[in-house]
């Protein structure tokens, strides 16, 4: 019983020693040589000439003969041979015979038995004194190439630990040839070619090692008489118009690399042809060809980008001060067209100049010139009428009374022309009326009539009023403001209903005395929901103040002028000067007023607050749900407007500071403040 247990233990130990030598069939070789006439066989054998057999007991010719034997003549030859009778699944063998050679080997089976057998036949020994490990050179294709081309000779054993073994034959720049055991039930020997990188990738999980039986160093015999490049160059760096390129060739023996610089792409070093001409709608292709008797012919194709259109532009639609124009571009190459928008006339996009000097009786031409880097220069002329006489140097020849007209002698400040103007009687509606401070209708006093004309200036005439005498204008006493209850207001506007919540406010602005605040867009339309501009609201406030003459004569704003580009007087000019010098508005940075910009609710109540002298207030706007949206610059004014009843905001608890202030809202705010 003890002998049987000992025998079982020895068998298990033997099996444990055998397991590392078992192999798995390789099935991912780059290619397999199966024909005697395959031209690669001679190339493979010739590569053995670059191996060092010094001290091995054989020479190159003998090594080549051994490899021919194992390819063609052995009982289990790699090409046309039979079954290898020592499978992995078989019993442990200590001797192998192929019909010609019989050798005792280290006990093994399968792939290891075959590799031991070949090494024993070629070198008389199958067990190396040392191994060369791929880990020394790195587990890459280049690492395996370096190891095999330097240290491996035909007939040596290449082991992939715990996986497979092959017999090395020879290698070139890209890969190597080997005999490989394949199959198990009826195993055969194959002649395989592997690329270095494929081999390493396939056996990446294994320790790859060379059983270096022959100690030769192949570097001692390779390329002694020079490298073998065979002039097979390939492009490794493509040249461009601004950078050199490079072609390289690898030595067929040792893998040394020879680099040759390719010049930059130009028409001196290269022959040049146009394959496809570029156009405005598609790219083209050019070919640069480099011919060299030593290195061969190389050509490089360059993509030519789509060409830009060559447009000639003409005016399609002339712009105006209120509408854009357009240019039509016609490409002279492809005939394509493009439309370019021209902005409305302004002083930013255009350069403005005046051709000729306008006078009272002679007009002039205004020229807007547009310089566009892509389209060219275009100019547009606008004819302006004569300025007309400016009768500002006037002399009162006869003052009017309640019963007779007066006479004004007017002199044009530009040309000196003289004309006589008839002043209406003091009872005329052409006058605005005010009383001297401290008097009333019940006490009597002096009634002052003011006559103002854009062309002729402003004149005042006094009329004595007896106590108790009212001077009604449109149902309101122009002296004390008392209502004439015998007179009913007449609503001139078809778009303002007497049931609207702003009817009284609009009528107040229309019938305001001594100066009407607004008269509507025309005789029958007020247009209550239109937005108000900055120029309009300061004019409303100026009229409410009685149209006082501004003290300054120089406008601080570059975008506000007394005479507009159309040659007419600016109706907002004096109101803007007055608002500026009274601190109602300071304009925008850069010296701009922006008269045409619309006014928000927060901005207008701020104007109104400044009009009232910026009275103190709590500054709190916390009662509004949208208080956070009221900018700091407007908070004090909005608080004042709420505290004085000018506005209480919207019914939903918001103020809406950034909403546009409409015409009805402006006159409503003024009415609640000034009535």
Image: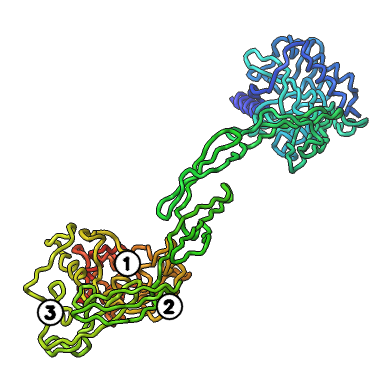
User: Which image quadrant is residue 672 in?
Assistant: bottom left
Please report whichever mark, 2 or 1, sits nearer to the chain's N-terminal start: 1
Left or right placement of residue 490 versus residue 288 in this view: left
Q: Secondary structure at mark 2?
A: loop
* Residue under the point 37% across and 63% down: 597
- How far apart are labels 3 and 1 at the CA level? 29 Å
The N terminus, quarter of image: top right
Q: Which residue is mark 1?
A: 536
Q: Nearer the viewer, mark 2 or mark 1?
A: 2
- Gap between marks 2 and 3, in whole Å? 37 Å
Q: Does residue 176 show up? A: yes
Q: Are marks 3 and 1 in contact (CB under 8 Å)?
A: no
Tell me which numbered mark, 3 or 1, is placed earlier along the sequence: 3
Q: Is residue 556 left or right of residue 491?
A: right
Numbered disc 1: secondary structure: helix
Q: Earlier in the sequence, mark 2 or mark 3?
A: 3
Location of residue 150 (image quadrant): top right
Secondary structure of the residue carrying tag 3 is: loop
Give the mark toward the camera: 3 or 1: 3
Mark number displayed over residue 278 = none
Left or right of 648 on screen, residue 80: right
Image quarter in which the C terminus is found = bottom left
Q: Is residue 98 visible?
A: no
**Residue at the disc numbered 3:** 482
Q: Is residue 423 left or right of residue 410?
A: left
Q: Residue furthest right?
A: 225
In terms of depth relative to the viewer, which is nearer, 381 or 141?
A: 381
Residue 405: % across, % down: 24, 77
257, above or below 370, in the image? above
Point out residue 111 in the picture as x, y percentages from the top left corner.
Answer: 70, 22
> Measured from the top left, where is residue 553 in percent x and y?
43, 78
Which numbered circle lies on residue 553? 2
């Amino acid at each position: 019983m003890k002998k049987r247990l000992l025998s079982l233990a020895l068998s298990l130990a033997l099996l444990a020693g055998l397991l590392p030598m078992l192999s798995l069939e390789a099935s991912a070789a780059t290619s397999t040589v199966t024909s005697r006439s395959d031209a690669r066989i001679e190339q493979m054998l010739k590569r053995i000439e670059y191996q060092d057999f010094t001290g091995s007991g054989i020479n190159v010719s003998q090594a080549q003969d051994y490899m021919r034997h194992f390819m063609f003549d052995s009982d289990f030859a790699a090409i046309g041979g039979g079954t290898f009778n020592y499978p992995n699944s078989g019993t442990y063998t200590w001797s192998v015979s192929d019909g010609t050679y019989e050798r005792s080997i280290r006990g093994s089976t399968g792939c290891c038995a075959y590799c031991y057998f070949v090494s024993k036949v070629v070198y008389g020994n199958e067990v190396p004194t040392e191994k060369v490990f791929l880990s020394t050179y790195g587990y890459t294709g280049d690492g395996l190439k370096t190891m095999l081309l330097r240290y491996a000779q035909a007939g040596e054993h290449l082991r992939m630990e715990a996986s497979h073994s092959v017999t090395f034959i020879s290698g070139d720049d890209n890969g190597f040839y080997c005999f490989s055991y394949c199959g198990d039930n009826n195993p055969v020997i194959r002649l395989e070619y592997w690329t270095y990188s494929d081999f390493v990738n396939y056996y990446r999980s294994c320790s790859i090692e060379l059983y270096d039986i022959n100690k030769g160093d192949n570097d001692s015999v390779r390329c002694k008489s020079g490298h073998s490049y065979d002039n097979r160059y390939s492009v490794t760096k493509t040249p461009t118009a601004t950078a050199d390129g490079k072609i390289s060739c690898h030595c067929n023996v040792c893998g040394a690399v020879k680099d040759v610089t390719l010049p930059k792409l130009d028409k001196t070093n290269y022959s040049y042809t146009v394959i496809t001409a570029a156009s405005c709608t598609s790219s083209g292709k050019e070919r640069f060809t480099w011919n060299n008797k030593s290195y061969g012919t190389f050509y490089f194709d360059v993509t030519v980008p789509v060409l830009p259109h060559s447009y000639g532009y003409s005016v399609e639609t002339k712009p105006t001060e209120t509408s854009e124009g357009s240019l039509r571009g016609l490409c002279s190459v492809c005939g394509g067209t493009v439309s370019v928008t021209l902005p409305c006339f302004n002083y930013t996009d255009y350069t403005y100049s005046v051709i000729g000097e306008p006078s009272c009786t002679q007009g002039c031409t205004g020229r807007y010139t547009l310089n566009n880097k892509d389209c060219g220069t275009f100019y547009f002329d606008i004819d302006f009428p004569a300025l007309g006489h400016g009768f500002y140097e006037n002399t009162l020849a006869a003052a009017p009374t309640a019963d007779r007209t007066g006479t004004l002698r007017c002199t044009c400040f530009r040309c000196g022309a003289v004309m006589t103007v008839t002043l209406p009687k003091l009872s005329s509606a052409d006058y605005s009326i005010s009383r001297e401070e401290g008097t009333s209708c019940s006490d009597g006093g002096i009634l002052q009539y003011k006559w103002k004309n854009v062309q002729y200036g402003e004149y005042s005439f006094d009329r004595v009023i007896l106590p108790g005498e009212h001077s009604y204008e449109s149902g309101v006493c122009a002296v004390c403001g008392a209502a004439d209850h015998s007179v009913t207001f007449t609503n001139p506007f078809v778009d303002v209903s007497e049931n609207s919540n702003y009817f009284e406010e609009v009528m107040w602005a229309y019938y305001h005395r001594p100066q009407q605040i607004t008269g509507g867009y025309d005789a029958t339309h007020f247009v209550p929901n239109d937005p108000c501009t900055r120029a309009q609201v300061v004019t409303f406030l100026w009229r409410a103040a009685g149209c006082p003459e501004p003290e300054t004569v120089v406008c601080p704003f570059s975008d506000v002028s007394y005479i507009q580009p159309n040659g007419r007087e600016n109706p907002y000019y004096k109101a803007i000067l007055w608002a500026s010098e009274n601190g109602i508005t300071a304009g925008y940075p850069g010296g701009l007023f922006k008269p045409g910009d619309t006014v928000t609710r927060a901005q207008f109540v701020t104007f109104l607050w400044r009009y009232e002298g910026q009275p103190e207030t709590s500054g709190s706007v916390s009662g509004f749900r949208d208080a956070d949206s009221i900018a700091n610059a407007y908070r004090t004014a909005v608080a004042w407007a709420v505290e004085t009843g000018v506005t209480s905001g919207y019914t939903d608890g918001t103020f809406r500071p950034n909403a546009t202030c409409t015409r009805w809202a402006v006159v409503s705010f003024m009415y609640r403040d000034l009535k």
